[in-house]
């Protein structure tokens, strides 16, 4: 019986956590990753000798190679997580985001379209972000709300979402789009807020927050996101969009204070570990918030990990896996980007 699933971007944060879940559920996973700066073989080191895991270096822009892989393994589903995801980098260099997030998705869709003509047993789950909705000062974004992306990153993801949906409408491809809130957890690149703060706490460095630190994000533990994706693959309706969130918003200051408290269980607090406020990035959204009632009602899914337990697990993983940081370029951890 075919249990093959393709995950694109599987050396990254969410992708590698999703692969772990899929293998636990007895699927065979083929990981396609281009090996960019945010890819890390440390994330899949425990799977190196697992017979249900295969890694293939592949850029999803390589349409012929992607088609040949799909044709060979005939997966039940493709989870598309291959993307440039860092807002600050998109401010400095939008071109990479257009190339990878829009054109990459286009070539993946073309490969799936070609395969689908002769084999209908496939689904494409396209993983997107809450940032496509832009600044949400009041209420929570529903799936049918207007997209108003603020950054080149968010605009590139919005574009890819529209492209994916158009292939459902025009070519009747079996696609589902998911929009998730801010993820956190083990294996996340420390260019992102929570692992950067953890790195700085461990290394006795200041904790920089943009603006006044009150920007609000809806936080979800990565394992909950992956569980939602698996449920959507099994029960989601073709052609639909699903928001995935925790319904919990916290300011960046609050998250930082939680991490400082947690850190005291692991090491003495360094004398330089203090919150500092730095110049805000251009176009910085104040608040993201999702209405996830659709997935709760239609798929009977809801998150299980509360924020304090999730942050405890996250800090504990980085503290126990400090060699992870050594595999990254230091400038990618500590350099300020997106200040233009």
Image (cartoon, helix red, strand yellow):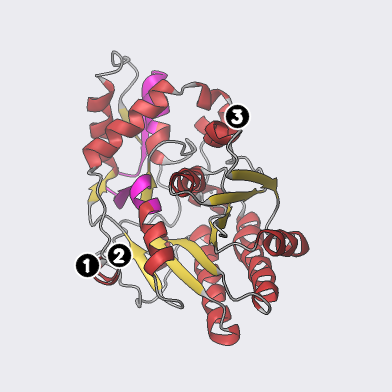
| Spatial CA span between label 3 and label 1 | 39 Å
Residue that protrudes farthest toward the right in the picture: 64
Residue 98 visible to an observer of this rendering: yes
Mark 3 falls on what kind of element?
Answer: loop
- Magenta range: 197-226
Question: How far from the left and from the top, in percent, is residue 69?
Answer: 71, 58
Which residue is denoted by mark 1 in the rendering? 139
Q: Which residue is drawn at 60% across and 84% down?
A: 171
Looking at the image, residue 328 lies above or below residue 269: below
Q: How crowded is mark 3: few (under 14 residues within 10 Å), some or many (20 or more)?
A: few
Quarter of the rendering containing residue 240: bottom left
Residue that protrudes farthest toward the bottom in the picture: 170
Residue 262 painted magenta? no
Mark 1 falls on what kind of element?
Answer: loop
Residue closer to the observer: 292 or 7: 7
Looking at the image, residue 186 lies above or below residue 226: above
Image-based side of 310 in relation to 38, left or right = left
Image-based side of 67 in relation to 197, left or right = right
> Does the CB distance between marks 2 and 1 fall below 8 Å?
yes
Question: How far from the left and from the top, in percent, is residue 178?
Answer: 42, 65
Quarter of the rendering containing residue 287: bottom left
Which residue is denoted by mark 2 in the rendering? 136
Image-based side of 157 in relation to 284, left or right = right
Q: Which residue is drawn at 29% across and 16% down?
A: 269
The answer to which of marks 3 and 1 sits earlier in the sequence is 1
Image-based side of 158 in relation to 248, left or right = right
> Does the CB distance between marks 3 and 1 fall below 8 Å?
no
| Spatial CA span between label 2 and label 1 | 7 Å
| Spatial CA span between label 3 and label 2 | 34 Å
Which residue is denoted by mark 3 in the rendering? 329
Question: How far from the left and from the top, in percent, is residue 336?
Answer: 51, 37
């Amino acid at each position: 019986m075919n249990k093959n699933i393709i995950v694109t971007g599987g050396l990254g944060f969410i992708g590698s956590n999703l692969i772990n879940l899929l293998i636990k559920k007895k699927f065979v996973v083929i990981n396609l990753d281009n090996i960019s700066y945010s890819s890390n073989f440390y994330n899949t080191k425990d799977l190196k000798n697992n017979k249900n895991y295969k890694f293939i270096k592949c850029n999803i822009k390589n349409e012929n190679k992607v088609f040949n892989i799909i044709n060979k393994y005939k997966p039940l589903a493709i989870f598309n997580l291959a993307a440039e995801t860092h807002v600050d980098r998109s401010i400095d260099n939008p071109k990479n985001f257009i190339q990878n997030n829009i054109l990459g998705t286009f070539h993946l869709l073309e490969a799936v379209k070609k395969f689908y003509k002769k084999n209908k047993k496939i689904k494409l789950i396209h993983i997107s972000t809450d940032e496509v909705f832009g600044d949400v000062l009041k209420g929570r974004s529903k799936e049918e709300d207007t997209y108003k992306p603020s950054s080149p990153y968010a605009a590139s993801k919005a574009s890819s979402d529209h492209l994916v949906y158009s292939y459902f409408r025009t070519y009747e491809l079996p696609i589902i789009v998911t929009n998730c809130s801010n993820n956190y957890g083990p294996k996340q690149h420390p260019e992102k807020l929570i692992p950067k703060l953890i790195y700085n706490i461990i290394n006795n460095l200041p904790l920089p927050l943009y603006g006044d630190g009150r920007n609000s994000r809806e936080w979800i533990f990565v394992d909950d996101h992956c569980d939602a994706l698996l449920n959507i693959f099994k029960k989601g309706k073709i052609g639909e969009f699903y928001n995935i969130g925790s319904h919990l918003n916290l300011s960046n200051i609050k998250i930082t204070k939680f991490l400082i408290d947690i850190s005291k269980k692991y090491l003495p607090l360094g004398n330089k570990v203090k919150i500092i406020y730095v110049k805000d990035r251009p176009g910085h959204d104040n608040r993201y918030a999702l209405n996830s009632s659709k997935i709760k009602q239609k798929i009977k899914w809801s998150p299980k990990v509360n924020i304090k337990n999730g942050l405890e697990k996250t800090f504990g993983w980085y503290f126990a896996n400090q060699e992870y940081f050594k595999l990254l370029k230091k400038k990618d951890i500590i350099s300020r980007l997106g200040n233009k």
